[in-house]
Image: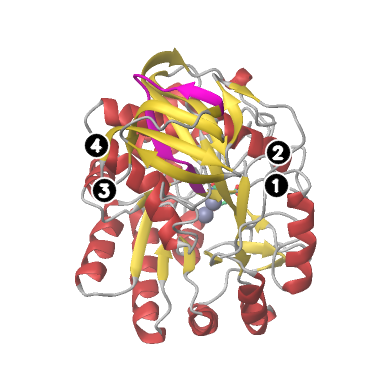
């Protein structure tokens, strides 16, 4: 007797697409067949007309737990993941405790584990000389990769991000200089794990911002863009690629927003360097022209840019230069997003719109159904060392499955979000394409939009 049978669905992986039946027992995939087997299952889902993917993975989620649980917590972010068709998330730093050594890792892991509605992996945070000698112990704990917020100042005590850095502020560690960053690359290289960077040049941003009378331009998106231009990203990415080449560290560029970066990543890959990149739906779907309609909810770092950047990013996703797409789920409260563009925090929710927006992209002919499996399942799992346990439909692996309906049309309603935060730039958008079942290790955790209310069953995934 099988525990679960998913029959008649069109099963999609980067390698193949076709109608198959998937048999699950004891949380694992035990058979994928084109003919139905004799043995029956305790439960059968008829997926006729639906598409069946290896569970989607979001490698870039800030759940705010602890530190800012008024914005979000891990119980709600992982419910949001389940609602959004996602079976594994990678928890990104910018919470308290910051994951900077074994002790903080263990503490945070226990905290997250008690609230996890989906499986999760964890990032380690680089804070320069304060923890360069702790990276190996973090790696041994099983962090998937190391995050370095290049360009941000951080709080002296909590190492949380300072969104709008004022050099007068004494309670912060100012953005690291390039020499300190080089040492971080050396330290990460020794672990063999990737270093992933936020890429904005703080020096350039500081002097450009000092030259703008921000009080006069507090609601002018163009002024924000002028202070954080493409060049700010390009400068950091250039240096990072050279550091990766020198130190041997595997480099991953997070949330790419600028057209120039796509070219830099492509060139690095052609030069056989270990460089990868990602982007997010907000850069693929929004531009500066949307600010008047959406308002301050659109503010994130790096900022959404211009049409030509957007086109280049799509090209990068299409041709595989940008191997994965993730949400950069960065919740805030609506109140926090009110006020001057230069003072409010950056970021928006993304867990419940990531998969739908990328399904819309399939419907629009921007990417193929198989590419969807690549950018949301296989590549994230491969890049951060959890493949084929996650991101595949191979027999013997975790039965993580996302079943989606490419025909379903609806309007995004932020009030229906599972997230505590309702801050999104996509409220009211008409979308075609929706996840309809989320299955985590054989357990149906979301069905027709309804997330199961039982005890969280998510596990920590060691990489
Ligand atoms: C993120 C956050 O709020 O944690 N904000 C954002 O604008 N992307 C931090 C980050 O990813 O840079
Ligand atoms: Zn970032
Ligand atoms: Zn982020």
* Front-lying residue, 116 or 25: 25
x and y percentages locating residue 300 in the rendered image: 51, 43
**Residue 110 lies in quadrant:** bottom right
Q: Quadrant of the C terminus?
A: bottom right
Precedes in sequence: disc 3 or disc 4:
3
Q: Is residue 300 left or right of residue 104?
A: left
Please identify, in this view, whether the residue under mark 4 or under mark 2 is nearer the observer.
Answer: 4
Residue 29, image x, y percentages: 49, 45
**Comparing marks 4 and 1, which lies closer to the viewer?**
4
Asked whether the residues under the numbered discs 4 and 2 touch, taking CB atoms below 8 Å apart as contact, a structural biologist would say no
- According to the picture, the residue beneath numbered tag 4 turns out to be 368
| Disc 3 to disc 1, C-alpha distance | 36 Å
Q: How many labels, in total?
A: 4
Label located before the other in sequence (2 or 3): 3
Q: Which mark is residue 41?
A: none
Question: How many neighbours does mark 1 have within 10 angstroms: few (below 14), some (14-19), or many (20 or more)?
Answer: many
Q: Quadrant of residue 187?
A: bottom right
Residue 35 position within the rendered picture, expressed as x and y whole percent measured from the top left: 32, 32
The reply to whether the C-beta atoms of the residues labelled 2 and 1 are less than 8 Å apart is yes
Q: CA distance from mark 4 to mark 1?
A: 34 Å
């Amino acid at each position: 007797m099988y525990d679960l049978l998913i029959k008649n669905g069109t099963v999609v992986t980067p390698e193949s697409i076709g109608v198959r039946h998937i048999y699950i027992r004891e949380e694992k995939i035990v058979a994928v067949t084109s003919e139905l087997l004799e043995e029956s299952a305790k439960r059968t889902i008829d997926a006729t007309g639906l598409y069946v993917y290896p569970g989607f993975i979001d490698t870039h989620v800030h759940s705010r737990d602890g530190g800012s649980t008024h914005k979000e917590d891990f119980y709600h972010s992982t419910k949001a993941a389940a609602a959004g068709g996602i079976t594994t998330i990678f928890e990104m730093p910018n919470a308290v405790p910051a994951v900077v050594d074994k002790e903080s890792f263990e503490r945070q892991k226990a905290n997250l584990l008690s609230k996890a509605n989906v499986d999760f992996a964890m990032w380690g945070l680089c804070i320069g000389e304060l923890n360069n000698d702790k990276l190996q112990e973090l790696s041994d704990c099983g962090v998937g990769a190391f995050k370095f917020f290049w360009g941000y100042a951080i709080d002296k005590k909590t190492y949380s991000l300072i969104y709008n850095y004022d050099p007068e502020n004494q309670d912060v560690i100012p953005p690291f200089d390039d020499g300190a960053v080089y040492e971080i690359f050396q330290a990460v290289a020794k672990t063999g794990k990737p270093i992933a960077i936020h890429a904005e040049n703080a020096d350039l941003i500081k002097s450009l911002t000092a030259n703008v009378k921000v009080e006069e331009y507090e609601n002018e998106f163009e002024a924000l863009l002028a202070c954080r231009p493409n060049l700010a990203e390009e400068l950091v990415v250039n240096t990072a690629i050279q550091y990766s080449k020198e130190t041997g560290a595997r480099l991953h560029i997070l949330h790419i927003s600028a057209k120039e970066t796509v070219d830099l990543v492509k060139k690095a890959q052609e030069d056989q360097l270990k460089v990868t990149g990602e982007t997010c739906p907000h850069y693929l779907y929004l531009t500066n022209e949307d600010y008047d309609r959406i308002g301050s909810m659109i503010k994130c770092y790096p900022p959404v840019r211009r049409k030509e950047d957007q086109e280049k990013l799509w090209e990068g996703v299409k041709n595989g230069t940008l191997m994965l797409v993730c949400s950069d789920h960065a919740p805030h409260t609506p109140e926090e997003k009110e006020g001057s563009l230069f003072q409010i925090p950056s970021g928006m929710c993304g867990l419940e719109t990531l998969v739908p927006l990328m399904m819309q992209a399939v419907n629009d002919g921007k990417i193929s159904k198989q590419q969807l499996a690549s950018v949301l399942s296989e590549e994230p799992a491969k890049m951060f060392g959890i493949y084929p346990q996650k991101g595949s439909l191979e027999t013997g692996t975790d039965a993580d499955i996302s079943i989606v309906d490419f025909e379903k049309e609806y309007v995004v309603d932020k009030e229906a979000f599972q997230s505590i935060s309702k801050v999104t730039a996509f409220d009211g958008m008409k979308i075609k394409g929706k996840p309809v079942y989320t299955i985590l290790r054989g357990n149906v955790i979301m069905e027709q939009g309804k997330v199961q209310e039982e005890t969280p069953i998510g596990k920590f995934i060691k990489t």
